[in-house]
Image (cartoon, rainbow, N blue to C red):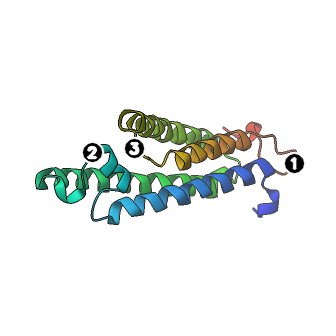
Amino acid sequence: MSPSRFGRGLQLAAILYLVVAIGIALVGCAYLVSPSFMPYHAQIVGMAWGEVPERFRWLLSAFQRGAGALALALAVALAAIAWIPLRRGEMWARCVLVVLSLVAGAPFLFIVRHLAVLSGASVPLAPLVASTILLALAAVASFWPSGSSSAPTDADSP
């Protein structure tokens, strides 16, 4: 199927999901390769990396790398589903992308905002809010009627 046969809403949704997936992948990579916690983590705990007891550094490093790996997994899932089945107009892909976005995005946004309120740290809230808005727009766009008789419809779903 050529890209011209995809509905405009599906094209826009796929692009938005891919933009967010790239951002999530970059954050995931940063968390995976960083030798210490992020500057906003230092603000939250009130100490530099070197001041944190060694065993806590091990634990924090494991949590940070785990978060990075999960971010990469989420990015790959979003990108793969957006690039292939979503662009084909498959209803399950639209639903799974919305669920993935909500299940991963909402708690993360809440946790980061909560830490900012508790600590007064300068956490990266703006990129999270922007990603949330892009994900919401992608979800809406993925359900726009295609306006084309050649694009798959809900009637084509099993």
Q: Secondary structure at mark 2?
A: helix
Residue type beneath disc 1 = Ser
Nearer to us in this view, 26 or 96: 26
Horizontal side, residue 51 vs residue 74: left or right:
left
Calculate the distance from the C-alpha at mark 3 to the C-alpha at mark 2. 9 Å
Asked whether the beta carbons under mark 3 and mark 2 sit within 8 Å of each other, the answer is no
Q: Secondary structure at mark 1?
A: loop
Asked whether the beta carbons under mark 3 and mark 1 sit within 8 Å of each other, the answer is no
- Which residue lies under the disc numbered 1? 148
Task: Indicate which label's residue lies in the foreground, 3 or 1.
Answer: 3
What is the crowding at mark 2: few (fewer than 14 residues within 10 Å), some, or many (at least 20)? few
Quarter in which the N terminus is drawn: bottom right
Q: Position of residue 74 (x, y in %)?
A: 46, 51
Q: Earlier in the sequence, mark 3 or mark 2?
A: 2
Horizontal side, residue 6 vs residue 96: left or right:
right
What is the crowding at mark 3: few (fewer than 14 residues within 10 Å), some, or many (at least 20)? some
Q: Earlier in the sequence, mark 3 or mark 1?
A: 3
Calculate the distance from the C-alpha at mark 1 to the C-alpha at mark 2. 55 Å
- Which residue lies under the disc numbered 3? 121
Q: Earlier in the sequence, mark 1 or mark 2?
A: 2
Tell me which corner region of the image, top left, top right, bottom left or bottom right, holds residue 110.
Answer: top left
Q: Position of residue 138 (x, y in %)?
A: 67, 45
Q: Position of residue 109 (x, y in %)?
A: 48, 39
- Which residue lies under the disc numbered 2? 45
Q: Secondary structure at mark 3?
A: loop
Residue type beneath disc 3 = Ala
Horizontal side, residue 120 vs residue 82: left or right:
left
Residue at 12 percent across and 52 percent down: it is 55
Q: Is residue 123 visible?
A: yes
Nearer to us in this view, 158 or 150: 150
